[in-house]
Amino acid sequence: MKKIAIILVNYQDYAKRFLAECRDSLRAQNYPKELFRVYIIDNASSEESFNYLKNVYPEAHIIARADGNYAAANNTGIEQGTEDGCEYFVIANMDTKFDADWLGELVLAAENNPLAGIVQSKILLYPKTEEEWKRPKINTLGNSVHYLGFGMTTHYGEEDKEGGEEYPEIKGYASGCSLLVKKEVLDKINGYNEEYYMYHDDLEMGWKARLFGYKIILAPKSIVYHKYEFERSVRMLYYMERNRYIAVFSFYSLNTIVMLLPALILMDLGMLAYSIFKGWFKTKLDVYSYFIQPENWTKISLFRQEIKKNRTKSDQEVANDFTGELLFQEISNPVLKCIGNPVLNYYWKIIKPLIKW
């Protein structure tokens, strides 16, 4: 049986808020303890946070890092796990509680699907009442990709139910809340892209894996409860907006980008107006500032070269599964619903059949 590295990333007071229940559920796994090891990457580490982790979870391997880069932190865990002989790498959030069969079912899905490079758990919203525990609701069954680079959860807020396909394919990407990735895939895609820093790092990995010919699947019996807070994501708007553009400019061929330009410009104008209305105009300017720096286009050019060298699928084969509608179940935007989405969706229907590269 393969050795498994489970990688958790701590940031500032994150562990004090979430680690105890996460740790207890990892200790309770119905999987041979000698076959997995937990690596906690203490991002933006201090002596206090490092010592806290050591005391609270002494059997975990604690690694200190200074700069807070989430993607780089995961790469650090992957490097250490590789040195320790691990062949499967599980990336998971700390704000979670894992079902006792979570890890075993995740591994079983990977073993039973040799063409799958990445496997995602069924991610449910953490119930807050006894009644909710009886009928937990879904956080995501695999994330979808909008053709302009946005990532979105699927089936958010729906009641969980059993049945259906044993290991359904995820046509977008696996959520970084709980996923397993095989070592051969990490070697091929060169791990996490550290330029992303945080947010859309899982979208980047999934998009790249699909272009390189790997499937992404869901393990419905690998269950994790996520203490999801949408507001926490909103605080990181700079990375969310910047990174979707990095993805678009990195993965699409030049021909596809040209066809997307009208929609990209229309969306950007809408996002600019929205940023003024919502009070994060400076954040939007910071995104523009990133893209007017020549050294950043040099980085994107290198990403494009790497992808071109290794890709086995065309834009058409992958983007055919992308959506034309922006569906953020957590927020309601009547302008997006009544104007933006109909226009964007109609444009996608027109150009999607024209994408050949």
Image: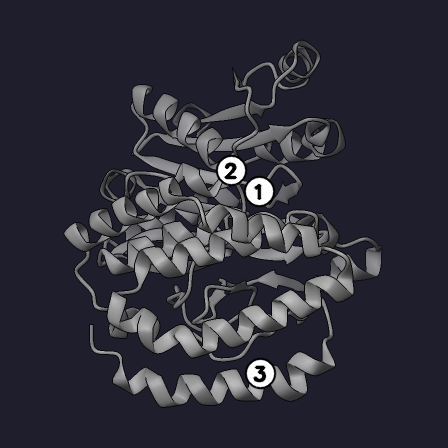
* Front one among 290 and 338: 290
| Left or right of residue 71: residue 49 | right
Q: Distance between the residues labelled 1 and 2?
A: 6 Å
Asked if one can make out residue 321 in the rendered structure from this viewpoint, the answer is: no
Determine contact: label 1, label 2, CB under 8 Å: yes
| Left or right of residue 319: residue 10 | right
Q: Distance between the residues labelled 3 and 2?
A: 45 Å
Residue at figure coordinates x 57%, y 74% from the top left: 326
Residue topped by disc 1: 100
Q: Quadrant of residue 5?
A: top left
Residue topped by disc 2: 30
Q: Is mark 1 on a helix, strand or loop?
A: loop
Asked if one can make out residue 248 in the rendered structure from this viewpoint, the answer is: yes
Classify the position of the N terminus by image quarter: top left
Coordinates of residue 275 in the picture (x, y in percent): 69, 62
Which class describes the residues within 10 Å of circle 1: few (<14), some (14-19), or many (20+)?
some
Mark 3 or mark 1, which is nearer the start of the sequence?
A: 1
308 to 342, vertically: above or below: above
Identity, as a three-letter code, of the amino acid under mark 2: Asn
Residue topped by disc 3: 341
* Front one among 298 and 233: 298
Mark 2 or mark 3, which is nearer the start of the sequence?
A: 2
225 to 88, vertically: above or below: below
* Front one among 345 and 54: 345
